[in-house]
Amino acid sequence: MQTAATAQLALLLEVTATPKPGNVDRERDHDDLRFEQFMAGAVGARDGLVAMTDPSIGVGEAFERAVAGMGERAERNTQFGALLVLAPLVRAAAREDCTLDGDGDGDGDGDGVERVVADTTVADAAGFYRAFEHVDVAVRDPPEGMEPLDVRRGADAVPALRERELTLSEVMERSADRDGVAREWVDGHERVFRAARAIADLDGPVPDRAAEVFLELLSREPDTFVADTHGTGTAHSVMVRAQEAREGGPELVRAFAESLVAEGVNPGTTADLVAGALFVAMERDGVTP
Amino acid sequence: MQTAATAQLALLLEVTATPKPGNVDRERDHDDLRFEQFMAGAVGARDGLVAMTDPSIGVGEAFERAVAGMGERAERNTQFGALLVLAPLVRAAAREDCTLDGDGDGDGDGDGVERVVADTTVADAAGFYRAFEHVDVAVRDPPEGMEPLDVRRGADAVPALRERELTLSEVMERSADRDGVAREWVDGHERVFRAARAIADLDGPVPDRAAEVFLELLSREPDTFVADTHGTGTAHSVMVRAQEAREGGPELVRAFAESLVAEGVNPGTTADLVAGALFVAMERDGVTP
């Protein structure tokens, strides 16, 4: 129960972290998405987060429950990606035979999140697809030949999943090149664990640390949600502007934040990674707000 | 489960409501109390809120659990008073033989919160006293002759409670003249129900409505937490200044908010009532963020 509560708190601290350029944060709302709706989403996700800690429930089904609860409370998609980042982390934290060390040495000992991902099944993949039925999630068209597995088909894609015997891990592999959350699933949550370490090592209020780490992540790799919604050119330019803002200091960061909101550019994948990092920083490193 | 989730969301929306002069809100922190600590408190309180919906658990014990969980997560007192306002409301919403109508006609039909309060026992009173052991709560010295029942004694006061056969309802009656939360318990949560109606009737984002209702409540009666911590003179003056700020418009409200924070004056009881009102507005009136 404590692990699920920590995951819920990670969702709340993520949206509180400010400034988080282009995203809803403690100081900024979007026209169609407000701060308090993220709170509602985090409240609604709680039972699904509890399910993520229950080894008798598949990770995919637990994820679907979290998304369904979120959508019911927030009446829109607030934290789909963040919940997808969290699912294997929360399960790894809860499983007795896993630890959340993220050492990435691949020896199977303690590489909890990699083990959780490796253990996913076709049923988990089905849960993941069903989750898309609960809220509108902005996604790109699938690559050629992958139409039967378009996530927007929701449960209708499940027979195709079963026929091809695709586990959730294999589904993630297929979009890892263009989706930053899927890449974490494939890479042992490497960026998340690194970001968690940075949050733990910084000083000051936890949301401020999370905002700093958000900007660092954004300045290092193009945000794949921005790429999905505005194209890879914009995603690359946002990355470069994030580098300049970091070097320029708080004033420039603030201006960058305002301009991304004005342009409707929302680096949502980077925010999802920060939610995962906040969870790891609290659960593994003992960070408290 | 949904009722407990709604109560948790009420706690989160209360702290988000801005400006809430003198209190931590979306735009303001205190030196020793930050926004994110209220989030942690709301996360930690969840299991206790679930207990409030479980008829097999006493209201007093459920309240104690909520306070214990809040204190564990927030590492300080963030929502003690709000949880005390919520406890009978949540129980009334959950009990099959109660409704949350707050019609205040005293006929016992549907006056759910009054029935819950009337049903409290000595064991509930003991739970209430034990709750004070989990966090530091600012309270005044007890009246003469009431020293054995000083809440700061925590569990040590339980034998005196048992000897005098005091129910939680009777404990509340004894401080209703000087504690605005206890007065709600005695008055059938009258101010809370009126505030809930106001929140439901207003337009716009729910936290903005809650902030407006906060100021209205503050302008009508002296805040008893301010009276406890700064004296009745200050509490009265804050009430008058709240009236002036309301009449003066947003700029004056903002200045009032800044000045109360600077003076360290925190109308916490009024904020507690708003948390209860948000719960009722969502649970009874179908308000969603």
Image (cartoon, coloured by chain):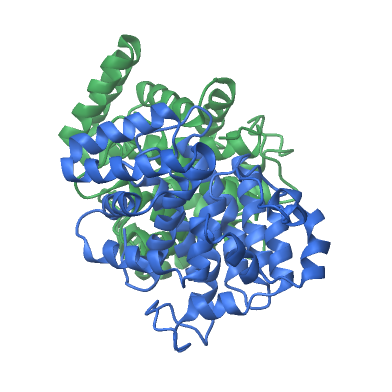
Chain colours: A green, B blue
Relative vertical location of residue B108 with respect to residue A2 in this rendering, above or below: below
Camera-side residue: B113 or B248?
B248
Q: Residue B46 is drawn in which quadrant?
A: bottom right
Q: Across the whole image, how many numbered discs are drawn on residues?
A: 0
Residues B91 and B20: in front is: B20
Q: Quadrant of the C terminus of chain B?
A: bottom left
Going 16% across and 33% down the picture, which residue do you hit? A262
Answer with left or right where residue A62 lies relative to residue B258. Answer: right
Asked whether B116 or A250 is in front, the reply is: B116
Question: Which residue is at 27% across, 22% downward?
Answer: A254
Q: Which residue is at the far front?
A: B144
Task: Please give left or right for residue A117 compared with residue B238 in the image.
Answer: right
* Residue A154 showing in the rendered view: no
Q: Position of residue B202 (x, y in %)?
A: 21, 61
Residue A95 in view: yes
* Observer-nearest of B87 and A83: B87
Residue in the image at 71% along x and 48% along y = B152
Question: Residue A84: horizontal and vertical position, in percent?
Answer: 46, 49
**Residue B194, quarter of picture:** bottom left
Report x, y in % for residue A235.
26, 30
Residue B255 picture location, percent across and down: 26, 31
**Residue found at x 66% / y 30%:** A103
